[in-house]
């Protein structure tokens, strides 16, 4: 299974329009570089429960603290808090906005069952951010399949 990259929502579309057309409809100068949205990858992206995966993050601001959590869904109502709070990983990005860290993947309670054969669940690893008036979402996120013996 291949890891999914992030979703950027309306902000990503707005950034693409602003960079491609330029602010206020003025064409962007030749050679202008578009900002890269943050991305998180998990390698491997199919692991046995209670084992580690390597998280690789790029496109973040430099020298910031980033906390990655494991969740069964990508967005939720604020008070429901579905994510596993026992295994978050907090890292500091380097000057280029990158990080690499190990994360022990747990059970992802409530994850979507996937695939034939033994128990396997689709889970998400990402950074929690407000996404609406009463909602939060993982932005960026990556998917991972957690299997059981």
Image (tube, rainbow, N blue to C red):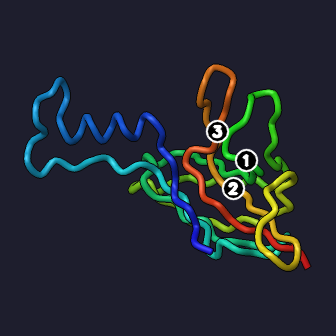
Q: Position of residue 100 (x, y in %)?
A: 56, 66
| Residue at the disc numbered 2 | 124
Tag 2 near tag 1, CB within 8 Å: yes
Badge 3 density bin: few <14, some 14–19, many ≥20, Cα 10 Å: many
What residue did someone put label 3 on? 137
Between the C-alphas of marks 1 and 3, the distance is 8 Å
Q: Farthest residue toward the top?
A: 133
Residue 36 image offset from top left, x and y in percent: 36, 51
Q: Residue at x 77, y 51 (%)?
A: 72
Between the C-alphas of marks 2 and 3, the distance is 11 Å
Label number found at residue 73: 1
- Depth check, front residue: 63 or 86: 86
- Position above or below: 58 against 10: below
Q: Does 9 appear above or below 92? A: above
Q: Mark 2 or 1 closer to N-term?
A: 1
User: Relative to the observer, which residue lies in front, 99 or 12?
Assistant: 12
**Quarter where residue 44 is shown:** bottom right
- Structural distance between the alpha carbons of marks 2 and 1: 7 Å
Quarter of the view holding residue 87: bottom right
Is disc 1 surrounded by few (<14), some (14 to 19) or many (20+) residues within 10 Å? many
């Amino acid at each position: 299974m291949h890891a999914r990259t992030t979703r950027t929502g309306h902000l990503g579309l707005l950034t693409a329009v602003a960079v491609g057309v330029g602010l206020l409809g003025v064409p962007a100068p030749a050679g202008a570089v578009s900002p890269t949205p943050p991305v998180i990858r998990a390698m491997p992206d199919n692991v046995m429960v209670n084992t580690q995966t390597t998280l690789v993050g790029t496109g973040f601001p430099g020298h910031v603290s980033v906390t990655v959590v494991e969740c069964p869904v990508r967005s939720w109502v604020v008070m429901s808090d579905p994510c596993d709070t026992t295994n978050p990983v907090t890292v500091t990005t380097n000057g280029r906005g990158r990080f690499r860290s190990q994360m022990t993947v747990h059970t992802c309670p409530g994850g979507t069952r996937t695939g034939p054969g033994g128990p396997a669940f689709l889970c998400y690893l990402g950074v929690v951010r407000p996404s609406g008036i009463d909602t939060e979402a993982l932005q960026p996120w990556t998917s991972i399949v957690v299997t059981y013996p």
